[in-house]
Image (cartoon, rainbow, N blue to C red):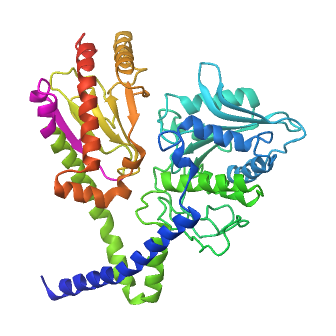
Amino acid sequence: MDGARRSERRRVQQFLVELNPALEAARKLERELDRHLAHRFNVFNYMGDGRPNEVLLSRIIGDLLNPAALHGQGASQLGIMLDKLSAESGAPRPRPDFSKPVRVQLERLIPGGRLIDITVDVATGAGPWCLAFENKPFAGDQPNQVRDYLKYLEDEYKDRFLLIYLSPRGEGPTDYSLPKEELPRWRGRLLVMPYWRDPESAGREGEYVEENEGGPKDEGEAGAPEAEGGREADDAPEDEPALPDDVFADFRTRFSLADWFAACRTQCHADRLRWFLRDAAAFCRQQFGGHSMATDSDTRAIQEYLFANPNQLETAQTVWDAWPGLKAELCGGFLEHLRAEIHRRVRGALPDIAPDLRVECRYGGEKKWSNFLWLNRPGWPAWDKPITNHPPGEGCTGVVLQSLGPGPNHWRWGVLHPLDKNKGTDRDKERRKALEDRLRRDLEPCGSLLWWPYVCQVRDDMTRWDSLLPELYRETKDGGGTITDYYVEGMIDLAAKAIPIIEEVEQAGTPS
C-alpha cells in the first residue's frame, strides 16, 4: 500500500472514530424522545400487515378529498389539491361550485369491467369536472389500463377532467398500459404524481417537512427539538436535464402526495387530523423515500459534526462515493447467500424435488424489477416470448422472489409465469387460469397479477434491503440469521406447495 492510500485510510478511520460518540449521543436522545413523546410512533405501521394496501390508501386519499367526510375540514383539502394540480397541468383551474355536493367514488366501475381507484366529481359552471386517480403504490399495470381510463373520462367529461397516475417515485405508466406515442394527446389531462419526492430545499411551500418545521405546533410539543429530517438525493432533480427516455418528464408533478399531506396539515386546526396527516406524510417518506438507515437524530448529529469539523468534509465525500459500490456488493452477496442456503437446505426439506431443482439468482442493482431469485426444474415446458423482466432461463414458470425497486427493495414472491394471462391461445389462457385457480385454492390467500398467477408481498420489516445492510452483511458473513431464515424458509415452503401444482397443470400439454 503506497503512502497516499495509507494516509487516506487513516483519515477515513479517524473520521469514523470521531463520529461514533456523536452518533451514540444522538441515539440516546432518540430513545428519550421515544419515551416521552413517542415521536417515531406512526399509526400507519398498524394498518394491514405493517403496511396499508392499495385499497386502504385510496380510501384515505378519497376521504380527505371529500368535503362531506368526517374530517370536518370542508373543501379546504380538495382546494389545495386543485390549486397545486392546475399549476402543474397547464390547464385552467376548474371553478368548483362547492354549494353543490362533491361526489367521491372509490373503485368506480366503467364499461369493460375496469375500476378507477378514485374519482372526484365537482360541479362547475361549464358542467361536471372530474379529478381521477389511478393508485399504483405496489401493483403493476394492466393491459391498456390507463389508456382505457383516459378514453372513458374523455367520453364522459370532454376536456373537463384530470387523471393522476400515483406511483412510488413518479414512475409513469408502462407502454403496455399507455402507448408512449399517445402521450401528446393527453397533455393537460394526465399527470404523474409521486408518493414521495425529495425536496430541493427545506421549508418551501408545499414540500414535505418533518414535524415542527412548519405549520402550527401540536399540543405537548413545547421544548421538543426541531426535527429537520434527512434529505436524500432525488432520482431526477429539477436542475438536471431529464434522461432522453424519460418521456414523462413533462407530466410529472413537482409536488408529491406527501407534500399535499403536509400542506393540508398547515391549513388544519384539528389536532387529531393534523397528527394523522403528519403520519401520512412520514409514511410516504419512509415507504418510498429510498434508503433510510439513519434516524433523523443520526442525520443531525453527522451534519453538526461536519459543520464543526469542515476539514472532514472531503473524507465524508469519499465515504459517500464509496457507498453505492459497497451497497451493490453487500446486497448482491446476500442474494447469492440466499441462493446457496436454499440449495443446501432444500435437499433435506424436499428430497423428492431437490435432485434436479435449479436455484438461481441475479442481482441487477438499482433498476426496477432487476433483482431475482428463482426455482424451477429443467423439464418444465418453455413458453414463447417471455417478458423482458422475467428471470433468464428457458421461459419457464418459476417460484420467484423479485424486488419491485427502485433498488433491492419492496420484495414479493410467488409463482411467476412468462406469459401474460391475456396473451396466447385459448388453450394457453385456459391452462394459465387453471394454474392460478389451483394455487389460490391450495395456498395461503394472496393475490395475482398479469404475470403472477400467485403473488404475496414480503413482510414489511424484511422488504427494504437498503435499511438492512448491516444485518445483511453480518448474516452473509456468519452463514445465517433471522433475515436469512425468513427468506429461505419462505421460499422452500412456497416451493413445496407450488411445484407439485405447477407440474400437474403445466405438464398437461406443451404450450403453444
Residue 258 vs residue 305: left or right?
Answer: right
Q: Nearer the viewer, residue 423 or 45?
A: 45
Q: Observer-nearest residue: 198 or 42? A: 42
- Confirm whether the magenta stretch covers residue 444: no
Whether residue 93 can be seen here:
yes
Which residue sits furthest left? 355
Residue 304 position, x and y percent, is 48, 82
Q: Does residue 20 sit above or below 50 in this rendering?
A: below
Image point (66%, 58%), residue name: 262
Does the stretch in magenta take in 347?
A: yes
Q: Residue at x 39, y 83 (%)?
A: 313
Quadrant assignment, res 345:
top left
Q: How many marks?
A: 0
Please tell me whether residue 224 is drawn above or below residue 355 in the rendered image. below
Q: Which residues are magenta?
A: 344-366
Residue 391 visible to an observer of this rendering: no
Whole-percent x, y for residue 13 in the image = 26, 81
Measured from the top left, where is residue 352 in percent x and y? 12, 23
Query: Which residue is at a point 85% across and 45% down the rendered structure image?
Result: 95
Residue found farthest to the front: 35
Please identify the quarter of the rendering in which residue 389 is found.
top left
Report the quarter where the C terminus lies.
top left
